[in-house]
């Protein structure tokens, strides 16, 4: 399976290709009739497309991007991976992170700024 069908912890599999090649616009009823039973992996959990999109009660999807965004909005926290993890941002003021190797932990040296 290609990385093209995996985004932000969500595994669409062949469904991603099928949805991309679908003619749009398409009603939610037609979309769920055709693809509703397809499973979508999100971390350790799987859900059907129907379970994810049916609660939205959308009339129509204009393009694949709208369908993909709806899926991403509806997957659970299991797709996130490590919560509160970022290798790019320092802790916010008042945030208490206990990550290994964090500044001010015993055995850590200060880095020199250039």
Image (cartoon, helix red, strand yellow):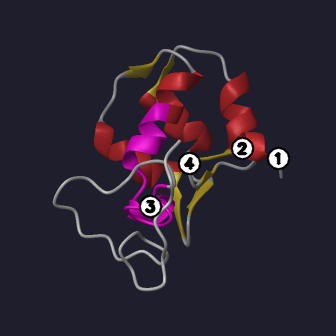
Mark 1 and mark 2: Cα distance apart in space: 6 Å
Does residue 25 appear to the left or right of 16 in the view shown? left
Q: Is residue 84 magenta?
A: yes
Q: Residue 19: x percent and y percent?
A: 66, 31
Is label 1 or label 3 in front?
3
* Residue that sits furthest to the right in the current view: 1
Mark 1 and mark 4: Cα distance apart in space: 14 Å
Query: Mark 2 highlights which residue?
Result: 5
Q: Is residue 74 magenta?
A: yes
SS at mark 2?
A: helix
Tags 1 and 2 in contact by the CB under 8 Å rule?
Answer: yes
SS at mark 4?
A: loop
Mark 1 or mark 4, earlier in chain: 1
Who's the residue at 35% across and 23% down the image?
A: 59
Query: Mark 4 highlights which residue?
Result: 8
Mark 3 and mark 2: Cα distance apart in space: 23 Å
Query: Mark 3 highlights which residue?
Result: 85
């Amino acid at each position: 399976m290609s990385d093209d069908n995996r985004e932000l912890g969500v595994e669409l599999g062949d469904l991603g290709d099928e949805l991309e090649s679908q003619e749009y616009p398409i009603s939610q009823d037609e979309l769920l009739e055709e693809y509703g039973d397809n499973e979508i992996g999100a971390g350790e959990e799987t859900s059907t497309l129907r379970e994810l999109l049916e609660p939205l009660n959308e009339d129509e999807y204009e393009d694949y991007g709208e369908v993909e965004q709806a899926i991403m909005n509806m997957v659970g926290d299991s797709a996130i991976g490590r919560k509160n993890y970022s290798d790019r941002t320092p802790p916010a003021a008042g945030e208490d992170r206990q990550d290994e190797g964090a500044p001010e932990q015993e055995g850590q040296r200060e880095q020199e700024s250039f």
